[in-house]
Amino acid sequence: MKLALKLQADKEYSKSNKHLIDLYSTNDMKDLVCLNLAKNYFAMGNMKSAKKYSSECIELKGIYAKEASLIKGYILNKEGLYKEELDLYNQMLERFPDEIQLKLLKSDVLYEFNPIDSYRSFYKTVNCDPLNPNIHRMIAQHETNSRHYIQAILAKYMMLFSTQDPSN
């Protein structure tokens, strides 16, 4: 596994996959192997295989399922399969209810069905993490009101200032 991950870090995806496929056949660390196969195929532009292995990783319900769902969700979105993408995020939020990134992605895909529900979902997410500039940025992408752009900028600077060392 170590060699496969090193090859992946060096962007040697095909070589990495050879090692990962060997590990896959042994059923050892299968969720981690599936996740890394999905990452490699995604990086190589092979969305069909990336989707296959991310789906398998999710089905294994291991600790890497959330990360695999981000890959699969992206692919579903690009394929225009918004209902399946929304179902995926709802499924993952049942397992990871406090995961802000999943909440944001769910809110974003909800816009395809009902902008009002999308805004409600975004604003619930804002209440979970009001200083997260990504939340405000995503709202601003769907909102023509410039007030949200200002909120995004303010949230970003508030976050920057709140993490600075006071001795500087």
Image (tube, rainbow, N blue to C red):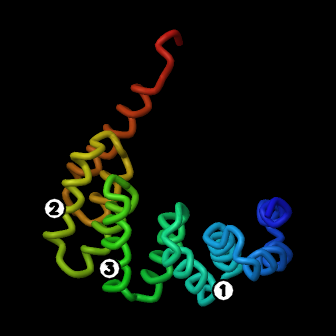
The N terminus lies in quadrant:
bottom right
Few, some or many residues within 10 Å of mark 2 (<14, 14–19, 20+) = few
Residue 49 position by quadrant: bottom right
| Residue placed under numbered mark 3 in the picture | 87
Vertical order, 65 against 158 (above or below): below
| Residue placed under numbered mark 1 in the picture | 46
Question: Mark 3 falls on what kind of element?
Answer: helix
Residue 117 position by quadrant: bottom left
Alpha-carbon span between mark 3 and mark 2 = 18 Å
Residue reaching furthest top? 167
Few, some or many residues within 10 Å of mark 3 (<14, 14–19, 20+) = few
What amino acid does circle 2 point to? Arg
Q: Nearer the viewer, mark 3 or mark 2?
A: 3
Left or right, 111 with respect to 61, comes to left
Residue 16 position by quadrant: bottom right
What amino acid does circle 1 point to? Asn
Q: Tell me what residue is drawn at x 46 percent, y 88 percent.
A: 79
Q: Tell me what residue is drawn at x 45 percent, y 83 percent.
A: 76
Q: Tell me what residue is drawn at x 68 percent, y 71 percent.
A: 33
Left or right, 116 with respect to 28, comes to left
Marks 3 and 2, the one that precedes in the sequence: 3
What amino acid does circle 3 point to? Asp
* Rendering coords of residue 66 (x, y %): 47, 64
Name the foreground residue: 102 vs 161.
Answer: 102
| Residue placed under numbered mark 2 in the picture | 120
